[in-house]
Structure formats: C-alpha cells, structure tokens
Image: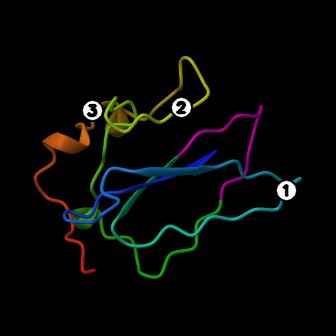
Amino acid sequence: MDVAVDVRLGSPTFGKSFTAELSEENGLQMYIPRGFAHGFVVLSVSADFFYKCDRVYSPEDEITVSWSDPALGIDWQVLDPKVSPKDAAALPLSQIDRLPRYEG
C-alpha cells in the first residue's frame, strides 16, 4: 500500500493523504509530486518496490513525518509494523518546522 501526504504549507489539501494498493495483479503505479510525504507498507509476505525520481537523492532536503501521526488518520492495515529507526523517531506533521510552501 502506497501513501502520499500533502505537506505543503498553505495548500488547500495540507495534511490530507491518498492511499493506493499497488500489486502485480492490478499493475498500478503511483506518482507522488514534490511537496508530498511518501510512505508504504508491504501487505504481502514479500514485495519488490521501485522508485523513479526526478532528481538525485538529497539527504539535507529530506523531511520525515511520523507514520503513526493520529492527525493524518492513515489506516496502515497492519497492527505492529516494522519501521526503520529514522521513521520510528519522526515527529508528527504539526511539529515539523521546515515544510515546503504551496505555490498554488
């Protein structure tokens, strides 16, 4: 399941999320534009996950939002997910002071 959250300050959809279940069977892909947080959870025994980016990865530009932020209301469909130490330490969206601005 792929998740995108609008984290652009001033956006009419700020804090809203969109989810899609991606599988070999449905052949779906998901485009996540700049200014959106991205996360995923594997709902099967295993998965191959591929990214296609429009720029080279830049760690200093990365913003990590808590996957379990109750304000986002995301149903991850798993009870006890395995998350990286970085993701486990992430702040809720309301506590992040360095967010992109909506260019509407």
Q: Which residue is the site of mark 2? A: 75
Q: Could you tell me how many numbered marks the image carries? A: 3
User: Closer to the observer: label 3 or label 1?
Assistant: 1
Quadrant showing the C terminus: bottom left
Residue segment shown in magenta:
40-49
The mark that comes first in sequence, 2 or 3, is 2
Q: Residues within 10 Å of mark 1 (few under 14, many from 20)?
A: few
43 left or right of 17? right
Quadrant showing the N terminus: top right
Q: Residue lying farthest front?
A: 12
The mark that comes first in sequence, 1 or 2, is 1
User: Three-letter amino acid code at disc 3?
Assistant: Ala
Q: CA distance from mark 3 to mark 1?
A: 33 Å
Q: Which residue is the site of mark 3? A: 89
80 left or right of 13? right
Q: Which residue is the site of mark 1? A: 26
Image quadrant in which you'd find residue 70 = top left
Work out whether residue 103 or residue 49 is closer to the camera in this orientation and state it: 103
Circle 2 SS class: loop
Q: Residue lying farthest top?
A: 79
Q: Residue lying farthest left?
A: 97
The mark that comes first in sequence, 3 or 1, is 1
Q: Position of residue 91 (x, y in %)?
A: 22, 37
User: Three-letter amino acid code at disc 2?
Assistant: Asp
Residue 51 bears which disc, if any? none
Verify CB contact (< 8 Å) between mark 2 and mark 3. Answer: no
Is 48 one of the magenta-colored residues?
yes
